[in-house]
Structure formats: structure tokens, C-alpha cells
Image (cartoon, rainbow, N blue to C red):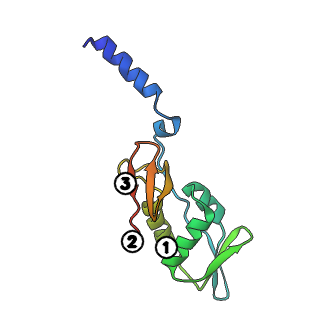
């Protein structure tokens, strides 16, 4: 194979890679900002977090509340949690959610989507093409 032909093939392959995969930026989830009122906690930057995770609001809330072990709901733009929680604990639970439902296990990119096949859920990566079953911890 001619070296020039090889370079052309590499260039052609690189052009076919989606733009979101070419980015080298690091995936960072915003740290929670909370407000505590009485014995309740409000995550006041909830919309920013959910937009970064790029997941359905309902799915995140159900899974997150299971991990927190409390009741909660959306109140305006904030996520209301029954009980008092530290930022550190909530950040760790959001990170756990992202490892399970957002980040690809192969390439570690957030360019994924949740697909359901029967009763099983799979994480499909649009960056590397991986298709892995979601194993909830």
C-alpha cells in the first residue's frame, strides 16, 4: 500500500467521525447547589445538571430518589428532597448515576443514549458504537 494512499484513507475516515466525538473537552457535571429550608433540601441548579447529563428528567429523578432513599419532586425549577442532605453526598450520587446511565464503559464519553430491548436497558454509544447492558448497582 502506498503511504500517500494510506494518509488519504485516514483523512477520509477522520472526516466521517461525528463532530461531537472529535471534541477533546472533559465531561464535567456541575456541582450541586443546595438550599435547605426546615428539614428539606432543594437542588437549585437542577436544570443545569440534567442538561449536562442529557437524560430525561423523569428517569433521572426516579433513579436519583431511589439512591437517596427519600421522597422528592420538582418544585418550579428546583428538585425538592424530603430531608437534609450534604452537597458531597448528592454529588457522589449524581456521579454514580452518570457512570451507570451516561458514560460509555468503553470510551468513557457521554455521547450515549438509553435503549430498551424487552425488559433490559442498554447504553448505546454514538461515539464508539458500543452497546452494553445497563447493570444497576
Mark 1: few/some/many CA within 10 Å (<14, 14-19, 20+): few
* Tag 1 and tag 2, C-beta contact below 8 Å: no
Real-space CA distance between mark 1 and mark 2, rounded to the nearest whole angstrom? 19 Å
Residue mark closest to the camera, 1 vs 3: 3
**Is tag 1's residue or tag 2's residue first in the polypeptide sequence?**
1
Real-space CA distance between mark 1 and mark 3, rounded to the nearest whole angstrom? 24 Å
Q: Nearer the viewer, residue 67 or 133?
A: 133
Mark 2: few/some/many CA within 10 Å (<14, 14-19, 20+): few
Q: Is residue 51 left or right of residue 132?
A: right
Q: Quadrant of residue 65?
A: bottom right
Q: Tell me where residue 6 appears, x and y as whole percent.
A: 31, 17
Q: Which residue is mark 3?
A: 105
Please determine whether, in this image, residue 83 is positioned above or below residue 13.
below
**Is tag 1's residue or tag 3's residue first in the polypeptide sequence?**
1
Q: Which residue is mark 1?
A: 88
SS of the residue under disc 1: helix
* Tag 1 and tag 3, C-beta contact below 8 Å: no
Q: Residue at x 53, y 72 (%)?
A: 64
Q: Which residue is mark 2?
A: 137
Real-space CA distance between mark 3 and mark 2, rounded to the nearest whole angstrom? 14 Å
Residue mark closest to the camera, 1 vs 2: 2
Mark 3: few/some/many CA within 10 Å (<14, 14-19, 20+): some
**Is tag 3's residue or tag 2's residue first in the polypeptide sequence?**
3
Q: Is residue 5 left or right of residue 129?
A: left
Amino acid at each position: 500500500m502506498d503511504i500517500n494512499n494510506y494518509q488519504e484513507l485516514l483523512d477520509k475516515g477522520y472526516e466521517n467521525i461525528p463532530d461531537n466525538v472529535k471534541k477533546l473537552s472533559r465531561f464535567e457535571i456541575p456541582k450541586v447547589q443546595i438550599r435547605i429550608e426546615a428539614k428539606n433540601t432543594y437542588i437549585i441548579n437542577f436544570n443545569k445538571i440534567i442538561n449536562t447529563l442529557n437524560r430525561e428528567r423523569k428517569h433521572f429523578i426516579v433513579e436519583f430518589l431511589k439512591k437517596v432513599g427519600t421522597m422528592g419532586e420538582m418544585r418550579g425549577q428546583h428538585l425538592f428532597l424530603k430531608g437534609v442532605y450534604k452537597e458531597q453526598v448528592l454529588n457522589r450520587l449524581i456521579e454514580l448515576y452518570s457512570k451507570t446511565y451516561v458514560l460509555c464503559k468503553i470510551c468513557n464519553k457521554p455521547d450515549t443514549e438509553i435503549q430498551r430491548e424487552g425488559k433490559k436497558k442498554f447504553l448505546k454509544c454514538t461515539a464508539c458504537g458500543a452497546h452494553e447492558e445497563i447493570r444497576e448497582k
